[in-house]
Image (cartoon, grey):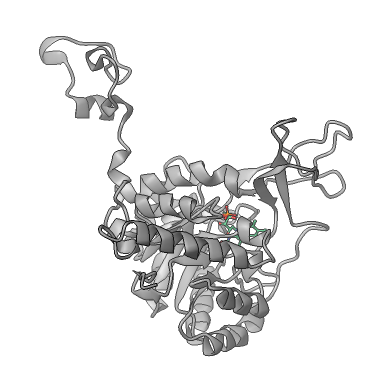
Amino acid sequence: MGVDRSVEFTGIRFENPFLLSSAPPTESESNIMRAYESGWGGVVTKTIGLHPVVNVYGAKAKFMRTTPEDANVTMKKRAGAALHSSWNWELISDKTLEWWSPRIRRIKESFPNKVLIASIMAGSGNDKELKHWQELAETAQGEGADGLELNFSCPHMDRRDMGSNIGKDQGLCSVVTEAVKEVAKVPVWCKLTPATADIVVEAAACFRGGADAIVSSNTFPSIPLIDPETLEFEINVDGLVSSGGLGGPAILPLSLAKMAQLTKAFPDKSFSGIGGISDFNQALSYFLLGCGTAQVCTAAMLDQAVGPNVIRKLLAGLDRFLEEHAGEFKMVEDFRGIRRDRIVLQSEIRRPDSADYHSGYEAVEGYAAPQPETAVRA
Ligand SMILES: Cc1cc2nc3c(=O)[nH]c(=O)nc-3n(C[C@H](O)[C@H](O)[C@H](O)COP(=O)(O)O)c2cc1C
């Protein structure tokens, strides 16, 4: 067929730009091997920590659906319902670093041309904790991982110095990235939480620490709905629930907005897009905004655990797109970021009479009138 699906991202060559993100699809050796056989260009392992974690009783992830008839968003299964989102309160891998180490090696030996990124997480409150990050990083890269993804985004951590609580603190973002970069011989990606006022601030901090790429988004903080009949949360343990993470179609426009902020602020940096991708058209939006790779979780979870049909559709869509635009684009890199500059301030959008709109400010005449740039910053 002759299309070139390959991308180079943070110095790593991928046979195609599609990865399974860090989540249940990548929680085991057998899943990851099946994912590679299905055609994924790479995977990010389920996040690995130093200490074992114990998940809550019962389901750790559920899917919410809606129908045109009832417009309800609910976990209750019903005919004709379309996927709205995934909701989860799953912690990081319940397997330890010792469990993962030989598996990372075996996976890489079996699939040397596929990309394996190790997602890692530790605390960050003191030097001992920072050494944990370094231990995780050194072990994973020593076993053959092609890159590291630092989980600054898990929304379920109670500890103030872990998961998304790191991603909400620019100081911790820099310090942890720097600690990992001190020992890293492979590229370091930082996966940020979308739950901050201005994700550009935390991304800048990661870049100051030496990050090679930013990954966004992890799931958005959310709670399940309350069943109107039982008055219980649709997912709960003993009636209790904690804030969890929303993924899937519902977060696609939200994640794109985060990504647009990032790629506009740092046009020369590398970004991996996640959130609501199930086929090529959605991944395309991320590429056009400037992402070099795209990651998938929810759609793959619903497709034989590792998404064989999802990756088939993603690859077919990419091939078709490259064929249709053969005169213009030879590979993803040729169209990456070409729509980034279309996102502008409201005041820059054409309107029936632009003279009447002053970015929400009162019209001022003469020398006191702010220039458009000043008006925006004010
Ligand atoms: C059940 C579940 C577990 C997850 N576990 C992790 C994890 O361990 N580490 C991580 O970085 N992201 C984790 N994620 C987040 C996903 O990797 C992804 O960022 C998010 O689901 C958005 O992508 P999607 O819309 O394709 O689902 C998890 C998501 C789900 C649904």
Q: Residue at x 50, y 52 (%)?
A: 217
Quadrant including the N terminus? bottom left
**What is the total number of numbered labels drawn onto the structure image?**
0
Q: Residue at x 87, y 47 (%)?
A: 238
- Give the percent coordinates (x, y) of residue 156: 65, 53
Image position of 346 with respect to 92: above or below: above
Quadrant including the C terminus? top left
Image position of 338 with respect to 212: above or below: above
Relative horizontal placement of residue 188, taking residue 336 as reference (left or right):
right
Relative horizontal placement of residue 103, taking residue 213 as reference (left or right):
right
- Give the percent coordinates (x, y) of residue 272: 43, 60
- Give the percent coordinates (x, y) of residue 130: 49, 69
- Between 276 and 205, the residue placed more toward the observer is 276
- Between 174 and 95, the residue placed more toward the observer is 95
Q: Kindly tell me whether residue 374 is visible in this rendering.
A: yes
- Give the percent coordinates (x, y) of residue 41: 48, 72
Image position of 366 with respect to 331: above or below: above
Q: Residue at x 56, y 77 (%)?
A: 36
Ligand 1 quarter of the rendering: bottom right
